[in-house]
Image (cartoon, grey):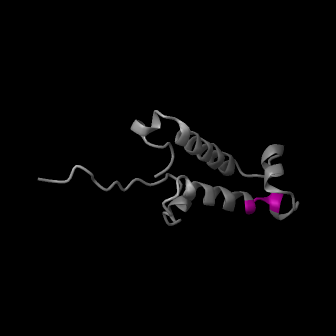
Amino acid sequence: MGSLHTQSTQEYADETVNTHEKTGIACDRLRMELKRCIKESACVQLDRRPAAECIKSHDGRVPDRCFILLTSFSDCKRSMVDMRSRFRGRKGDL
C-alpha cells in the first residue's frame, strides 16, 4: 500500500525564482527574487533611490516583472493569515 503523502514538484513560471534553494520559510523564494529584481532596476542602480521609493513612484524605472513579483509575494503573505488557506494551501508559495 502506498503512502498518502506524495512529493510535489511544483515550480514557478518564472525560471529565475526556481533557481533559488528552498529554505523552509514561507514565501522566501519570492521574497529573494523580488529583492533581486528591485535592486537590479535602473531606479536603484542609476538614481540611487531607496527600493520602497522606487516601488511607490511608478515612473517606469522599475520593470513590470518586479510588480508582478510584488503582487505574488503579497498574495503569498496574505494567504498565511487566511484561515481558509489551511485547506487550500498558500498562494504562490511552492
- Residue at (62, 60) in percent of width and height: 32
- Residue at (62, 59) in percent of width and height: 33
Viewer-nearest residue: 72 or 16: 72
Toward the top, the furthest residue is 84
Residue 64 appears left or right of 14: right
Residue 39, compared with residue 74, is above or below; it is below
- Tally of numbered tags: 0
Range of residues picked out in magenta? 39-44
| Residue 74 visible in image | yes
- Residue at (43, 39) in percent of width and height: 86
Residue 13 x, y percent position in the rendering = 50, 51
Viewer-nearest residue: 10 or 74: 74
Residue 42 x, y percent position in the rendering = 80, 59
| Residue 58 visible in image | no
Residue 62 x, y percent position in the rendering = 76, 52
Viewer-nearest residue: 1 or 35: 1
Q: Is residue 41 magenta?
A: yes
Residue 9 x, y percent position in the rendering = 36, 56
Viewer-nearest residue: 80 or 18: 80
Picture quadrant where residue 81 is located:
top right
Main SS, magenta residues: helix
- Residue at (48, 63) in percent of width and height: 22
Residue 28 appears left or right of 40: left
